[in-house]
Amino acid sequence: MDTADIIYSYFPQLTAEQRAQFEALGALYAEWNAKINVISRRDIDSLYEHHVLHSLGIAYSLRFPAGARVMDVGTGGGFPGIPLAIMFPEAQFHLIDSIGKKVRVAQAVADAVGLKNVTTAHRNVIEEKAKYHYVVSRAVMRLDELVRLVRKNVLHEPIGALPPGLLCLKGGDIREEMRPFRNISEADELSTFFKLPFFEEKKVVYVRL
């Protein structure tokens, strides 16, 4: 059965508040998904493994420090932004998507679990002017296109273990996508962290910007 317990097995250090927030996500997304299809009907039964834990793969590449400003591009219903905001309550997350109904779900879920470090906007990334230390995304477009669109939004102010840049969840063979960035990028295999079949060929790609 897909429950929040899968999160705790990989992140045992969570506080009671964080556990309660993660546990609340299942019912909240099931309720919203019945109204607005933000997660495929087939996939909603695997919410914690396929969406929440997948989002937290970024947490293995970088622990966002206090005060970090992070933009989630193409957040959909709030992934990876909401799980990361729960994991890193001292960082600030801004979730954007070009589809208004999906942003509405993300904001409603963030409000319901009491996230004070999340803001949302119905906006295409082309229109976003603000600056952030890091940009995160989950396979919304090719890496070169995403880098081109978000480069303007990166705040060149060192704050964490990694220089400012993009952390993107990707799947499959991405060697061609990474080739233009081979001197400033790296990829972590999620199967190294999460010993589940779903995470085979899943990666976190970091591009320094």
Image: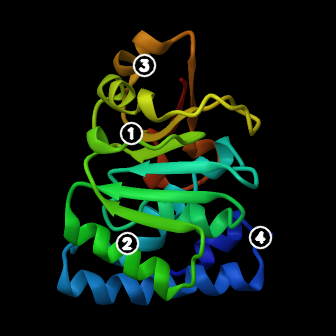
Badge 1 element? strand
Would residue 84 appear left or right of 15 to someone viewing this image? left
Between the residue at mark 3 and the residue at mark 4, the CA separation in whole angstroms equals 33 Å
Instruction: Give the number of the disc on residue 98.
Output: none
The amino acid on which the numbered mark 2 sits, given as a three-letter code, is Ala
The amino acid on which the numbered mark 3 sits, given as a three-letter code, is Met
Q: Nearer the viewer, mark 1 or mark 3?
A: 3
The amino acid on which the numbered mark 1 sits, given as a three-letter code, is Gly
Between the residue at mark 2 and the residue at mark 3, the CA separation in whole angstroms equals 30 Å
Between the residue at mark 2 and the residue at mark 4, the CA separation in whole angstroms equals 25 Å
Marks 1 and 3: CB-CB under 8 Å? no
- Rendered residue at 44%/51% (across/down): 72
Q: Which residue is mark 1?
A: 171
Would residue 121 appear left or right of 131 to someone viewing this image? left
Q: Decide which of tag 3 and tag 4 comes sooner along the chain.
A: 4
Q: Decide which of tag 2 and tag 1 comes sooner along the chain.
A: 2
Instruction: Give the number of the disc on residue 12.
Output: 4
Q: Nearer the viewer, residue 122 or 171?
A: 122
